[in-house]
Image: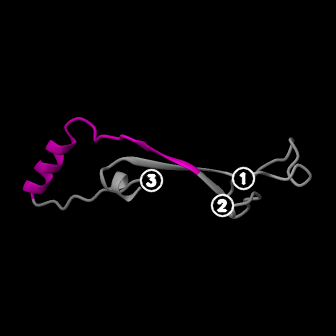
Amino acid sequence: MIYFGGQGERVLAFARIYLNENEYPKNYQFCMDKDKNNFPMENLCLVGLVSLNDPPKRFVAHSVSKCRKAGIKVIMVTGD
């Protein structure tokens, strides 16, 4: 996983868990809010990894090179 991330690829991990039907019926409303999540995040079973190629946009290398030649320190900030 570290190898793929280091190559600029997006790595997604997939896991599963079997939920008790009495505790989590079919109409259960899961909450994804950071402070209010109401679903288990422990004892998950890793199913697999997927690596997605996410190449830089066209001309990015050229733009970064021009910035560096101008004395600008280039850093990358992502939403990950």
Q: Which residue sits furthest top?
A: 58
**Residue matched to label 1:** 17
> Looking at the rendering, in which quadrant would you find the C terminus?
bottom left
**Residue matched to label 3:** 79
Residue 32: within the magenta?
Answer: no
**Residue matched to label 2:** 34
Residue at 87% across, 42% down: 27
Q: CA distance from mark 1 to mark 2?
A: 20 Å
Which element carries disc 3, helix, strand or loop?
A: loop
Q: Position of residue 20 (x, y in %)?
A: 85, 53
Amino acid at dot 3: Gly
Mark 3, residues whose alpha carbon is within 10 Å: few (<14), some, or many (≥20)?
A: few
Residue 44, quarter of picture? bottom right
**What range of the chain is rendered magenta?**
47-70
Nearest to viewer (mark 1 / mark 3) = 1
Q: Nearer the viewer, residue 11 or 70?
A: 11
Q: Is residue 20 left or right of residue 4?
A: right
Nearest to viewer (mark 1 / mark 2) = 1
- Pointers 3 and 2 in contact (CB under 8 A)? no
Q: Nearer the viewer, residue 57 or 50?
A: 50
Amino acid at dot 1: Ile
> Looking at the rendering, in which quadrant would you find the N terminus?
bottom left
Q: Which residue sits furthest right?
A: 22
Q: Nearer the viewer, residue 27 or 63?
A: 27
